[in-house]
Amino acid sequence: MAYDEGLAERIREALGDRPGVSERKMFGGLAFMVDGHMACGVMGEDLMARVGPDGYDEALGEPHARPMDFTGRPLTGMVYVAAEGIEDDAALAEWVERTTRFVATLPPKG
């Protein structure tokens, strides 16, 4: 599956010069890793957002968010956000910040 390069560039801008950021092609899209943990990414025109189990229900309550279910089963802690939910840079930056806050709580990768 191809992914939206424009959205990928906007995520790069939202991440800024944050240390520990890398990119990896996965899930047929592009994932942004922070200190080795997947934080967010692009699938088609959607944002993949890793919000964690505790932030999952709240994230699903946001407009244009839905469960990430590319395997046919929802992945708890991961949501897709449709393009309409991240049209402006402030909305995208808020989602990216939410994902980086979550991965900062994870143990360091060994």
Image (cartoon, helix red, strand yellow):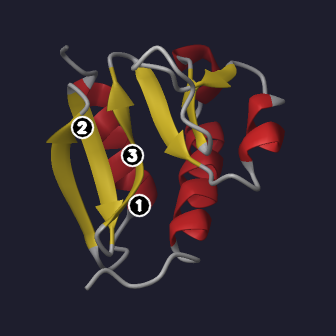
Q: Is residue 20 above or below residue 12?
A: below
- Marks 2 and 3 close (CB-CB < 8 Å): no
| Between discs 2 and 1, the one toward the N terminus | 1
Q: Read off the residue under disc 1.
A: 15
SS class of the residue under badge 2? strand
x then y, percent, for residue 4: 28, 21
Where in the figure is residue 12, as x and y percent of width and height? Answer: 32, 51
Contact flag, marks 1 and 3 (Cβ < 8 Å) = yes
Quadrant (top left/top right/bottom left/bottom right) for the N terminus? top left
Residue assigned mark 3: 11
Check the image and report above or below for 48 versus 4. Answer: below
Residue projecting furthest to the front: 73
Which amino acid lies under the numbered mark 3 shown in the image of this protein?
A: Ile
Q: Which mark is residue 30?
A: 2
Q: Residue at x 59, y 59 (%)?
A: 97
At label 2, counting other C-alpha atoms closer than 10 Å, the crowd grade (few under 14, some 14-19, many 20 or more) is many
Quarter of the image where one finds residue 62: top right
* Left or right relative to 53: residue 21: left
Residue nearest the observer in this picture, 71 or 14: 71
Q: In the figure, 69 relative to 109: above or below?
A: above
Q: Earlier in the sequence, mark 2 or mark 3?
A: 3
Disc 1 residue type (three-letter): Leu
Can you tell which mark lies on residue 52? none
Say whether marks 2 and 1 touch (CB < 8 Å).
no
Residue depth check, mark 2 versus mark 3: number of the one nearer the observer: 2
Label 3: state its secondary structure: helix
Q: Is residue 57 left or right of residue 106?
A: right
Report whether 60 appears left or right of 52. Answer: right
Instruction: Depth check: give the residue in front, 35 or 68.
Output: 68
